[in-house]
């Protein structure tokens, strides 16, 4: 019992009950012993739940097991799968370090997944074209190497962001800023018909002078 981890509501209740039951039996306990010692094996939240039960709702160890499993089975976290990892993608404009954390937090909950699958999922989840290209050219051999490489790249990304903060460019149109196109459209919209005619007349005169 000393080495038994108390139940906190996050473990699989069936698996935890098997370990608890075995620990009591190894100590030569009976089913009645399991019921008596049960409150001492619970953390505060499950213990509060146990105390809230009606006193006449449990008559045996089998009753306690059933009501315990029914209550906590739905609260455990479902282990992630390869499909969950494939769906973990970098958001547009998301920092690389943020994506790394989300991806590897998900990876940590998946059992028996090959390194190549992890690398492929991470690679396909990148939103930045340059990062996607660079990782394709420098593909690591293991997911540990992938993590170390990406953390180094995240450090470099943050250093560059601090060194070269983004600023508003006066020549926005040269940088492909859509706002400059919008301003041009507003200018064209506000032009009067006579302005357009005058411009055309000047163009004709200029052509005649050049002939």
Image (spheres, helix red, strand yellow):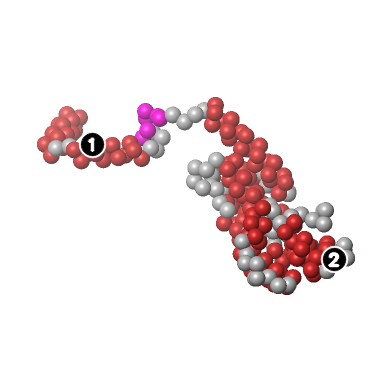
Please report the residue visible at 71 percent of the width from the left and 56 percent of the height from the top.
Answer: 42
In this picture, residue 90 sits left or right of residue 35 = left
Spatial CA span between label 2 and label 1: 88 Å
Closer to the eye: label 2 or 1: 2
Judged from this view, the residue extending furthest toward the front is: 55
Tag shown at residue 29: 2
Image location (x, y in percent) of residue 48: 64, 57
Q: Quadrant of residue 197?
A: top left
Image location (x, y in percent) of residue 84: 60, 58
The answer to which of 27 and 211 lies nearer the viewer is 27
Judged from this view, the residue extending furthest toward the left is: 194
Q: Which residue is mark 1?
A: 187
The answer to which of 60 and 7 lies nearer the viewer is 60
Q: Quadrant of residue 35?
A: bottom right
In this picture, residue 118 sits left or right of residue 194 = right
Q: Secondary structure at mark 1?
A: helix
For marks 2 and 1 on the same chain, the one whose residue lies earlier in the sequence: 2
Label 1: how many residues lie within 10 Å, few (<14), some (14-19) or many (20+)?
few
Image location (x, y in percent) of residue 135: 63, 45
Quarter of the picture holding the N terminus: bottom right
Residue range corresponding to the magenta coloring:
168-173
Q: Is residue 127 magenta?
A: no
Secondary structure mainly formed by the magenta segment: loop
The answer to which of 154 and 73 lies nearer the viewer is 73
Tag shown at residue 3: none
Does residue 156 lie above or below 78 as drawn? above
Image location (x, y in percent) of residue 185: 26, 40
Label 2: how many residues lie within 10 Å, few (<14), some (14-19) or many (20+)?
some
Please report the residue visible at 68 percent of the width from the left and 44 percent of the height from the top.
Answer: 147
Q: Quadrant of residue 15?
A: bottom right
Any part of residue 60 in sight = yes
Please report the residue visible at 52 percent of the width from the left and 43 percent of the height from the top.
Answer: 94
């Amino acid at each position: 019992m000393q080495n038994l981890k108390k139940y906190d509501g996050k473990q699989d209740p069936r698996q935890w009950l098997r370990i608890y039951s075995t620990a009591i039996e190894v100590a030569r306990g009976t089913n009645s012993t399991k019921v008596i010692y049960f409150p001492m094996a619970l953390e505060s939240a499950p213990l509060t739940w146990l105390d809230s039960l009606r006193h006449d709702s449990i008559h045996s160890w089998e009753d306690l097991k059933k009501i315990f499993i029914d209550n906590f089975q739905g609260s455990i976290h479902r282990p992630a799968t390869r499909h969950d990892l494939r769906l973990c993608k970098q958001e547009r404009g998301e920092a690389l370090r943020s994506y790394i954390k989300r991806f590897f937090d998900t990876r940590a909950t998946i059992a028996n997944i090959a390194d190549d699958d992890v690398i492929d999922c991470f690679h396909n989840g990148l939103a930045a074209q340059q990062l996607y290209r660079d990782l394709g050219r420098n593909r690591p051999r293991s997911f540990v190497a992938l993590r170390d490489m990406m953390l180094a790249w995240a450090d470099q990304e943050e250093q560059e962001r601090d060194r070269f903060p983004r600023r508003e460019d006066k020549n926005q149109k040269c940088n492909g800023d859509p706002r400059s196109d919008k301003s041009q459209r507003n200018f064209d919209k506000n032009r009067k018909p006579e302005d357009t005619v005058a411009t055309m007349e000047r163009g004709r005169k200029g052509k005649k002078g050049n002939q």
